[in-house]
Image (tube, grey):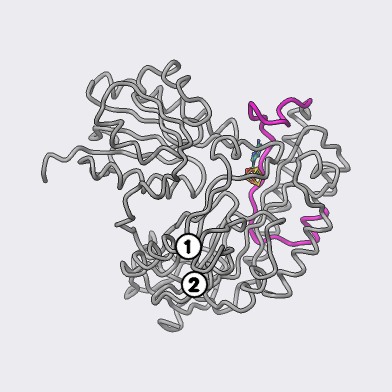
């Protein structure tokens, strides 16, 4: 090979960060860096961080501690911190950790190559007027048959527990034409499934031909692209679930029957304290409408246990809501106070109470997830192969409902869509036998 410098990227947190890491790697490609999977051979290490809960940000400092030895052995090594901890803590990171050279917030990634070239220790956590997407190079590479595509960033909702409106800033949507171009480019490289990303993706309102486009309009245009067989989007807010988006779930075959719609709590008192601006009842009615449009849709959600002021009755209301809906997938978290958010000022629930509630929540959600999975046994599903399995002759892919499915198929190729009969269900995946190719 040439004398290209090696870049090692570690991504923490959400899918938005996975997408951003790829884009940063591409931008640094222009500055002569190629990515490596091997930390030891890196000339630059980029940590793309998450600030959503305390545990997520603590990981950064433990990793930086470990990088000290590497930098001592290799003084030319550059260390960059990107993402939401970079945005929230800025120059504080340089003070706390002497190994760090660059701190760059999510809105300043297009400046990374210049920062690297300029050398020295630098911080950029500005929110520029022009959005970062217009300044980043067009996306050139994709890995495999599935891809993420960021369509909107930031959030104006200000849920009382959440740092996103502070770290990612106000809601900004990318113009539809740019998204369609990027999607066409991905399809031309063999991508068959695109997941549209945004902190508040269903609030999408991008500039389109003849006026502003909502997410439903964008999905309909994406569905026209040759080769794109599957569309997904995440993460949504219940209050932005417009009629046309619900309708799209009923009549757009490419739109997969899966919806991640965080509710956070089933208690109206807590939802109010969280500044969610919806009630348990409005959420349940919304779910009814989504299910009317697409009866087999798999529902997923986020829950927080132990939000300040949560009583046992509030917590029971959350369990009731979960039993009423029946989720096929869910994420639950213990409330974690984030500096600067309104909820962080409130008296916390005792740690042991919050821990016990989280366990109860997780037990119920895991049982529901398993029941939904087990109900797939005997059914035929479509699977998009993403990688070879651990067993010889085995492929792994995702079903329409986003279940991981293991399939014995020695001739199987990555990127193939196959029909599979589900034969077994285990804790986190299904297994099945191939019926036919290219349904
Ligand atoms: N504490 C616990 N969970 C949180 N989330 C966001 N902020 C916090 C917090 N301070 C959860 C929410 C959100 C998901 C991405 O992370 O459930 O939907
Ligand atoms: Fe955070 Fe989501 Fe609420 Fe926005 S809608 S503040 S991203 S939890």
Q: Residue at x 40, y 34 (%)?
A: 47
Q: Is mark 1 within 8 Å of ligand 2?
A: no
Q: Which stretch did the figure color magenta? A: 320-347
Estimate the x, y position of residue 347 in percent, counting from the top left.
Answer: 79, 25
Residue 156 part of the magenta-drawn span: no
Q: Between residue 17 and residue 31, name the one nearer to us.
A: 31
Relative to 14, does residue 149 appear above or below in the rendering? below
Q: Residue at x 55, y 79 (%)?
A: 380
Evaluate if marks 1 and 2 touch, with contact meaning CB atoms under 8 Å apart.
Answer: yes
For numbered disc 1, what is the local secondary structure?
A: helix
Check the image and name the residue furthest to the front.
210
Give the alpha-carbon distance from disc 1 to disc 2, as whole Å. Answer: 9 Å
* Residue linked to disc 2: 221
Q: Is residue 322 left or right of residue 143?
A: right
Q: Residue furthest left?
A: 2
Q: Which residue is mark 1?
A: 176
From the viewer's perspective, tell me whether residue 70 is left or right of residue 432: left
Where, by quadrant of the figure, is residue 32 drawn? top left
Q: Position of residue 24 (x, y in %)?
A: 35, 43
Picture layout, residue 355 above or below residue 123: below
């Amino acid at each position: 090979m040439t004398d290209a410098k090696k870049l090692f990227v570690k991504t923490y947190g959400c899918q938005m960060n996975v997408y951003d890491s790829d884009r940063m790697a591409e931008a640094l490609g222009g500055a002569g860096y190629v990515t490596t999977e091997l930390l030891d051979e890196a000339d630059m290490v980029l940590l793309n961080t998450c600030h959503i809960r305390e545990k997520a940000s603590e990981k950064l400092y433990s990793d930086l501690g470990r990088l000290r030895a590497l930098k001592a052995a290799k003084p030319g090594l550059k260390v960059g911190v990107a993402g939401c901890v970079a945005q929230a803590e800025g120059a504080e990171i340089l003070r706390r950790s002497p190994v760090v050279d660059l701190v760059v917030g999510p809105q300043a990634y297009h400046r990374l190559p210049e920062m690297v070239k300029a050398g020295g220790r630098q911080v950029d956590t500005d929110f520029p007027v022009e959005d970062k997407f217009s300044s980043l190079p067009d996306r050139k590479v994709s890995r495999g048959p599935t891809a993420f595509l960021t369509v909107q960033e930031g959030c104006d909702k200000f849920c009382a527990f959440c740092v996103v409106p502070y770290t990612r800033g106000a809601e900004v949507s990318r113009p539809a034409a740019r998204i369609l171009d990027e999607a066409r480019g991905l399809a031309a490289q063999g991508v068959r499934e695109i997941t549209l990303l945004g902190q508040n993706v269903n609030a999408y309102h991008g500039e389109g031909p003849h006026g502003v486009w909502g997410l439903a309009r964008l999905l309909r245009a994406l569905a026209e692209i040759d080769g794109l067989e599957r569309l997904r989007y995440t993460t949504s807010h219940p209050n932005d679930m417009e009629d046309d988006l619900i309708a799209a779930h009923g009549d757009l075959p490419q739109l997969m029957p899966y919806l991640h719609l965080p509710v956070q709590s089933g208690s109206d008192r807590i939802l109010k304290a969280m500044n969610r601006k919806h009630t348990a009842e409005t959420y349940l009615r919304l779910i009814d409408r989504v299910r009317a449009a697409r009866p087999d849709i798999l529902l997923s959600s986020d829950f927080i246990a132990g939000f300040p002021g949560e009583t046992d009755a509030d917590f029971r209301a959350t369990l009731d809501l979960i039993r009423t809906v029946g989720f096929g997938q869910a994420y639950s978290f213990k409330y974690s106070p984030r500096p600067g958010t309104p909820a962080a000022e409130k008296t916390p629930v005792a740690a042991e109470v919050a821990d016990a509630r989280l366990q109860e929540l997780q037990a119920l959600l895991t049982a529901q997830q398993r029941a939904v999975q087990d109900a797939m046994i005997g059914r035929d599903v479509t699977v998009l192969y993403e990688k070879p399995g651990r067993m010889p002759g085995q492929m792994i892919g995702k079903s329409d409902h986003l279940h991981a499915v293991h399939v014995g198929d020695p001739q199987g190729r990555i990127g193939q869509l196959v029909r599979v009969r589900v034969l077994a269900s285990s804790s986190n995946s299904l297994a099945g036998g191939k019926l036919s190719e290219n349904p």
